[in-house]
Image (spheres, grey):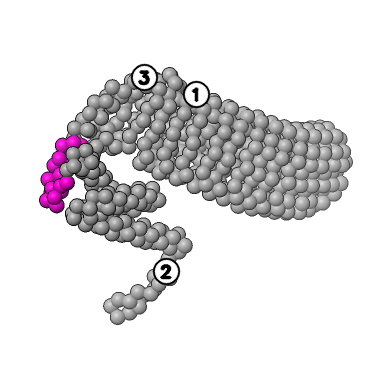
Amino acid sequence: MMAVSGFGQEKTLEYNSEELAEKTERENAQTQYLLIYEEIKKADKAKNINETKDALTGYKNAYEKLLKVKSTYPWWEKTIIQYRIFYVEKNIQALKEIEYLKKEYEFFPNVGFFKKINKYIYEINKKRTEQTIEKMEKSFEIYKVNGKIILKKYIGQDSVIKIPVNIGKYKVEIGKFAFSSHDKHLRIDLSKGFTEIPERAFSGCKGLQQVKIPEGLLKIGPWAFYGCTNLEKIEFPETLKIIEEGAFAGNNKIQNIKLNDNVKVIGNQAFAGNENLEKIYFSKALEKVGKKAFSGCSKLKKADLPKSVKEIGEEAFWLNDSLEEISIPSDLDEIQAGTFGTCINLKRVRLGEKIKKIGEGAFYECTSLADVKIPRSVEKIEEHAFADCGALQKVEIPHGCKEIDERAFEWCRSLVEVKLNEGLKIIRPSAFANCISLTSITIPKSVTVIEDKAFSNCKKLEHVIIKNEETQIAYNAFEKCLFQIKK
């Protein structure tokens, strides 16, 4: 909160926590930029009095700090930052040329020479740009548009490719499917300065085995490395924050993934179908795991999700045959549909104490899951949530749970103990159908409705206690059961 006076009266401005954080970020960015600007002015002064070494050092320091501001605050004054980077780069190159002339030819320019050098540097840059583009055209089909050089298709034969972030005044961009037809051994080195790998940049590149991603990269775009079936090694930079949809989906040879502690988002299907993925080290700052992010990773045995995770998408770990253990972050409030469905070797699950809903098919067909503690915070268990968990032996429904949805525990063949607590109101159709080991059940007074086939075909169910005489019971709720109803 702060006070502002104007037109004779004082006004109070209030900032919420997000606005205050954003305001602080802007102020930090501006403060750092102003300090860098002072360094540039000192370098300019040194250059103008022919102190070329001091000037070169000053420009280099300023350049590194400008890149850091650009990566840390990518949204702040993009045009100004990019102009300053261009200005500093131009002066660094000019001073390097002068230092070369001094060393090789004992050439010592006077102060006025710096006014002429810019034309000389411009001609050199123009020539170098033309030569670099000519060389690039031997390896790529390219086209120029809006100040960019787009690498449309790789046509070269080199086994190692270095991709610059700029060629002269042109920004280099990798086009969609640029490497899709390349199936020979390939290693990619991206130059420092790339902040994003664009959509489908390396999609379908079957020859790609290794990628060097530079520091400064913030985001890996959708399907960027999809179907790179021979990609074995990738090192993620410390600056990376977002891995978007399908970025590494369908890659068969990646075995280990280590994410830095700045990654906040793993997008939908980001690593789906990585059949040989065995270990993943999650970022401590991770907030979101997208839909089907790790589905079909059949060799992944353990997933230690950090406490920072606030959302796990539908089917995020679906069909992970080898997954044995999972810990659910304490702040998560929902297990979404199919999140751990068909994880047939999942034995242990630790659910957080803030979960309110266990979604449809969340643990469907987890046939090795023998025990699960449903936290007191759970209010609803949706259909098929634990259906076909053949090893599940006992379950307690907490006081806060109002509803057990359709087929939630159907075909839990080993289920011998079910404790229903007061607070439960509705047991939906086939909720406990085909639980063939269940021998007794007590329905609490709070239950008002037991719907069709709720306990159908529970062949060993002999004793049923219903505490509320007014509970509405469907005519076939207990069909094919051996029991005596007691109210």
Q: Nearer the viewer, residue 138 or 108?
A: 108
Q: CA distance from mark 3 to mark 2?
A: 61 Å
Q: Which x, y percent locates residue 23? A: 39, 61
Front residue of 171 and 415? 171
Secondary-structure class at tag 3: loop
Q: Residues within 10 Å of mark 1 (few under 14, many from 20)?
A: some
Q: Is residue 54 magenta?
A: no
**Callout 2: SS:** loop
Tell me the number on the disc at residue 167. none
Which numbered marker is on residue 230? 1
Residue position marked by numbered label 3 in the rendering: 157
Q: Earlier in the sequence, mark 3 or mark 1?
A: 3
Mark 1: amino acid: Asn
What residue is drawn where x is 23% and y is 55%? 46
* Helix, strand or loop for disc 1: loop
Q: Residues within 10 Å of mark 2 (few under 14, many from 20)?
A: few
Pick the front one: 439 or 450: 439
Stretch of the chain drawn in magenta: 108-125
Above or below: residue 107 compared with residue 187? below
In the picture, which quadrant includes the N terminus?
A: bottom left
What residue is at 30 percent from the left and 35 percent from the top?
172
Main SS class of the magenta portion in the image: helix
Q: Are discs 3 and 1 less than 8 Å apart at CB? A: no
In the displayed structure, 85 sits above or below 475; it is below
CA separation in Å, label 3 and label 1: 17 Å
Residue holding disc 2: 14
Tell how many labels.
3
